[in-house]
Amino acid sequence: MENEDLFEWKKGTYYLPRIGVEIIIHPAARVLNLEENLPAYAQSDRRIELDKILGTCIPSPLFGREDGIKYQFVIGHVPTLSPFSAAFVQGHEEGHLLSYLGYLETLRKEAQRLGYQFTFLTPEFCEDSDHRSKRMLSMRHTHADYKAIWRQEKVLAESIANVGGLVSIVKFGASEIVTTKLRKAIAKMVVDPLSEIEEIDQQ
Ligand SMILES: [Zn+2]
């Protein structure tokens, strides 16, 4: 990314601001969360391009860096959303990040701690996924690892990320009516569960 010095890339210990868990970023990876870099984002000469990728968690391989970083992950920022929708979307993207970085079990446990469990997010699934993700980052992966993590089936990938959105929304302080509707939509693996929430519920 150009203007690289403007941005604060995260390495090592990282506290995800929306989901609210701490992880250790794999030494071969670095993370840029644009929500945490708004002044630099405003100045970036790539802002128009970045605007098009809002609401995303993009993994990209890097080549030939001397510091050993081989992958970077950029979480978008959505300036036009309501605070409620932004809380869900940013938490959703952090959910994708946890999947890529091998911390799905951390996400599952945080959701469970808050009282939420989903049949598609079992401890066994998370353990398997986390092993595959860490092999990806260590470049010791198989093609099956690659397909399971970077080419995961869309509905499953989005449903997992939506658990991150739900955790974020709970911490944002959404009403129980809203969190219950979201939980039910996510359990049904609705890809865009926000679409099932009436605007009036979000006040
Ligand atoms: Zn997503």
Image (tube, helix red, strand yellow):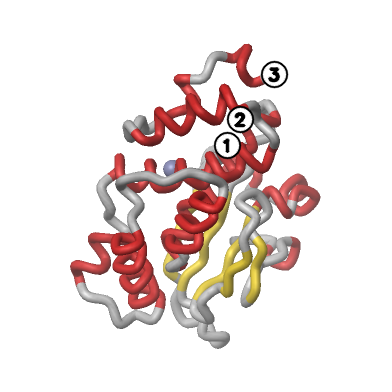
Given residues 192 and 146, the one toward you in this image is: 192
Q: Give the residue type at disc 1.
A: Phe
For disc 1, the marked residue is 88
In this rendering, is residue 10 above or below 33? below
Between marks 1 and 3, how big is the CA–CA gap? 14 Å
Q: Earlier in the sequence, mark 1 or mark 3?
A: 1
Viewport quadrant of the N terminus: bottom right
Where residue 26 sits in the image (x, y, percent)? 51, 77
Q: Residue furthest left?
A: 144
Q: In the figure, is residue 168 to the left or right of 132?
A: right
Q: In the figure, is residue 139 to the left or right of 200?
A: left
Q: Residue furthest right?
A: 39
Where residue 77 sits in the image (x, y, percent)? 63, 43
Residue drawn at point x = 61 percent, y = 17 percent: 201
What kind of element bears circle 1?
helix
What kind of element bears circle 3?
loop
Q: Give the residue type at disc 3.
A: Gln
Some atom of ligand 1 lies within 8 Å of the CB belonging to the residue at label 3: no
Q: Is there CB contact under 8 Å for labels 1 and 2?
A: yes
Where residue 176 sits in the image (x, y, percent)? 60, 27
Viewport quadrant of the C terminus: top right
Q: Give the residue type at disc 2.
A: Ser
Residue drawn at point x = 52 percent, y = 45 percent: 115
For disc 2, the marked residue is 85
Q: In which quadrant of the rendered view does residue 30 lie? A: bottom right
For disc 3, the marked residue is 203
Ligand 1 quadrant assignment: top left
Q: Does any portion of residue 48 appear in the rendered image? A: no
Q: In the figure, is residue 19 to the left or right of 64?
A: right
